[in-house]
Structure formats: C-alpha cells, structure tokens
Amino acid sequence: MLDWHDIQIFLEVARSQRLTDAARRLGLDHSTLSRRTRRFEQKLNTQLFERSTHGYHLTQAGQQLRAHAEEMARHAFEAGEGLTDKNHQISGQIRLGVTEGFSTWVIAPLLSAFCSRHPGVTLDLLALPRVVNLSRHEADLAITVERPVSPGLVVSRLCDYRLRLYGSDGYLARHGTPERLAELGAHRLVGYVDDLIFSEQLSYLEPLLEPSAAGQPPHFAMRSTSVTTQHAACLYGAGLTILPCFMASTSPTLRNVLEHDIAIDRQFWITARQEQRQLARVRLLWDFLREALEDNRAFLMGEAKEMVIPEAAPADG
C-alpha cells in the first residue's frame, strides 16, 4: 500500500520540477528529500523522474502516477475543507500572485480593507515581475496581463487599465517636451529589457518608435525588467517612460507627454484552479477584488487621481 506522505512528497517534486523548491515548500532539507524520492522509486521498483541539471522531469510512469496523486490530493483537500470552519467563520490562508506594479500601487492598498473585514484570513501577496504558475501550485489566485489558456483554470476579465507616456519636470526642463511622435527618437527613453519581457502585452514602445526610424535612432538611457524601477528612473529624470496611469498619478512631478497620441489600453485577468475557486475564502477574495476594481475604473483609466478605498468594517456589520 502506498504511503500518503510519500505521495505528497512525489507530488511536490513533480509540481516544482526542482528539488530545492520542493524541499523549501515541504520544510525538508535537500538531501533528505532526495533520499525520500529515491526510496519511493525503489519501493515501487519504478523510475518516476528523469534527473538532470535542468531539474526533475517525470517519466511516463511518473506521469501516470501524478494523475492519480493529483486526484488523491484533491479529495483529501476537499475532505479537509469540508470539516473545517463549521461555524462559518472565514479563515485560512490565501496566496495571491499579482504583477509587481499592480500589486504595489493598487492591490495592496485595496486589500487592507479585506484584511480588516476578515481577520481570520492570512493573505500571502506575491508581487512578481513574471507570471505566477498556478499549475505548479505557486498561488491560489493569480492576476495576469494575459488571458490564461491552461485547462482546469477558471478565468475572468478583472478590469481594464490605461498607460501613457510620462516625463519628470526635471527631465522636460532639460530636454524639452516632444510635440510629435517622430520626435521621440531625439529623447532618452526608459523601457523593458526586450529579451526578458515576460508578456507581449508589455511591449509598448517599439510600435511608437517606428515613425522616427528615418531620423535619429531611439536612445534607451535605461532598461529594466521591473516597472517599479522604470517608474523610479522616470521620476528622477532618466528619460521618458510608458507607465500605467495608476502608477504615474501618484507622482506629482510626472507629466503626461503626447497625451493625444499615446493612450494604451490593457486588461488584467483573474484566474484560479477549479478546486481552489470553490473555497469560500477564495470566492470571497475573488468577489471583493472584482467589486473594488469596478469602483476604481476611473482611477485605472487615468480619469481620476485617487483610488476609492473600500470600507474596512467587518462584512457582518
């Protein structure tokens, strides 16, 4: 008979594909986890993983076992959830993965009200300059700039937001304000590192620079994988930068440049695995975010300067 603890270890390694990541999540040291994994394979007399410098990848037998293990984990999870919170008090942990800029400028301020309403819930907010991988169980919920297409996910359009071109008062005083798109080639720019952009939805500047191709080539004074870093660079005069309105509006020394030529609309999507979406606390956070962001549509589209923060009173009165 298979040991449930062995199954849990196998499943975490299969999901993480790296022994160090799985060991951290399981609270085990690297060498112990390696021994436990090999011992499990010996017990089954079957190789479950192909090991290489790139990580642990499932063999065909490992893939077959994972399908059963995921089903076992789902039933165990649902059984545990069904036996807890019998007094209907919302409690437990929720891990929410969000892109870095949106998390810092919008989601964290909004969630202060959610935390006050539901003190029994612990929120882990993963603010990352990349896409959170729900299939590897990195989070319970994710907010992304692209619509996820993986099977087994519940996906909904969360909100729209707008980006514009900005420059600081100091930069514009030194270098002047461009009046036409074709003049961008004469200015210092701040943008993403092209080959490290995690989503094509973040590739803003290249289409705008085409009109200046016959003149001066564009000069990027700084590139960064972080929109927060780009904001700071723009704020201190490094160059002109495409920024979400919800970020730039918080900085009184940033000015909207080429307002009638540059207005880029994008969307955020909210997603969860099917089984996580059914949890009461996850549904509660999902609905809270949708309502709070709907109330902030004007702020996200650059039509209002301040956010609308939900009341922090408990939901039951």
Image (tube, rainbow, N blue to C red):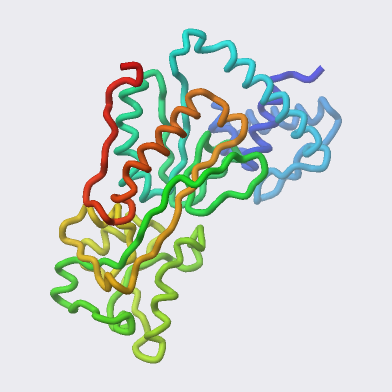
On the image, which quarter does residue 152 sit in?
top right
Q: Is residue 138 left or right of residue 206?
A: right
Between 56 and 105, the one lying in front of the other is: 105
Split into 4 quadrants, where in the image is the N terminus?
Answer: top right
Q: Is residue 255 above or below residue 300?
A: below
Residue 281 seen anywhere in this rendered image of the structure = yes
Q: Is residue 63 left or right of residue 152?
A: right
Residue 28 seen anywhere in this rendered image of the structure = no
Between 24 and 264, the one lying in front of the other is: 264
Q: How many numbered discs?
A: 0
Q: Is residue 199 above or below residue 29?
A: below
Tell me where residue 165 appears, x and y as whole percent: 30, 67
Name which residue lies at 33% across and 68% down. 190
On the image, which quarter does residue 16 sit in?
top right
Split into 4 quadrants, where in the image is the C terminus?
Answer: top left
Tell me where residue 203 appears, x and y as whole percent: 45, 66
Between 265 and 202, the one lying in front of the other is: 265
Tell me where residue 5 appears, x and y as whole percent: 68, 20
Q: Is residue 203 left or right of residue 308?
A: right
